[in-house]
Image: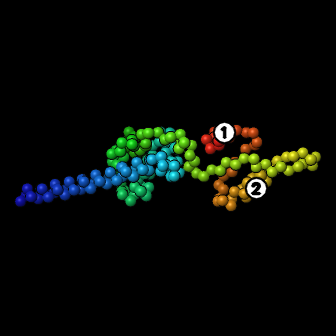
Amino acid sequence: MSDLIRFDQLRFQSEDDCEGEVLCLKIKTHLEELFSDSHLAEDGFLLKHVQKNKQGFVSLKLLTSLKKIRTLTKNWYMTLVGALYSDLLEVNDESTKVRRIEPLPKWLMCSPTSKHLLAWNFSEEQSSDDGAARGPEPAALSENVLQKFSIYGRVTSLQILPPGRELPADMQCYGKR
């Protein structure tokens, strides 16, 4: 009789192992999808976290909190096991972060993680008392730009560069030459 009980316990244990492995494979599939070029091009939040770390690592706890993974597990150790199953992802030495094995393509590294609008030639020239053309006052120009673009959504930041000045390094990949 004891052999029968042991066999049943082993059978249930192996069923649990099988369910756990299926779950890890689902997590692996979702992680690979999250780190794909096509998904990162659409998901500014995750792309920002990939770009934030110089080596491209993202916290397993953060990944576990994402809806796609959270529906499968809330346990970041399960997310770790799913990442370890993947041939496309690698885990750091501390087993706390994951990254793609293949580096991000250059076009994706220059993708904005928030919405940017680059506009130029905004000088609405005014004439001075002596008849010479001059640009608008900086405050008036700022107000004018904000007014024109606020119809499309909330403007959170505005930077005005004097004519002929180079774009800042962080904006150069958005401007075409």
Residue at figure coordinates x 75%, y 39% from the top left: 164
Question: What kind of residue is marked 2?
Answer: Asn
Say which quarter of the image contains residue 2: bottom left
Question: What kind of residue is marked 1?
Answer: Arg
For residue 144, which numbered disc appears in the image? 2
- Of the two numbered discs 1 and 2 on the same chain, state the one appearing first in sequence: 2
Q: Element at badge 2? A: helix
Q: Position of residue 11 (x, y in %)?
A: 17, 56
Residue at figure coordinates x 44%, y 50% from the top left: 34
Residue at figure coordinates x 28%, y 52% from the top left: 21
Q: Position of residue 63 (x, y in %)?
A: 43, 51
For residue 72, which numbered disc appears in the image? none
Marks 1 and 2, how far apart at CA? 26 Å
Q: Position of residue 177 (x, y in %)?
A: 66, 39
Give the label, 1 or 2, closer to the camera: 1
Question: Measured along the vertical axis of the image, is residue 140 above or below residue 109?
Answer: below
Residue 91 visible (yes or no): no
The residue at which mark 1 appears reads as: 177
* Pick the front one: 155 or 25: 25
Question: Measured along the vertical axis of the image, is residue 5 above or below residue 99?
Answer: below
Asked if the residue at tag 2 contacts the one at tag 1, i.e. Cβ–Cβ closer than 8 Å, the answer is no
Q: Element at badge 1? A: loop
Farthest bottom residue? Answer: 151
Query: Callout 2: few (<14), some (14-19), or many (20+) C-alpha neighbours within 10 Å?
Result: some
Residue 90 visible (yes or no): yes
Q: Position of residue 103 (x, y in %)?
A: 47, 39
Figure quadrant of the N terminus: bottom left
123 sits to left or right of 169 = right
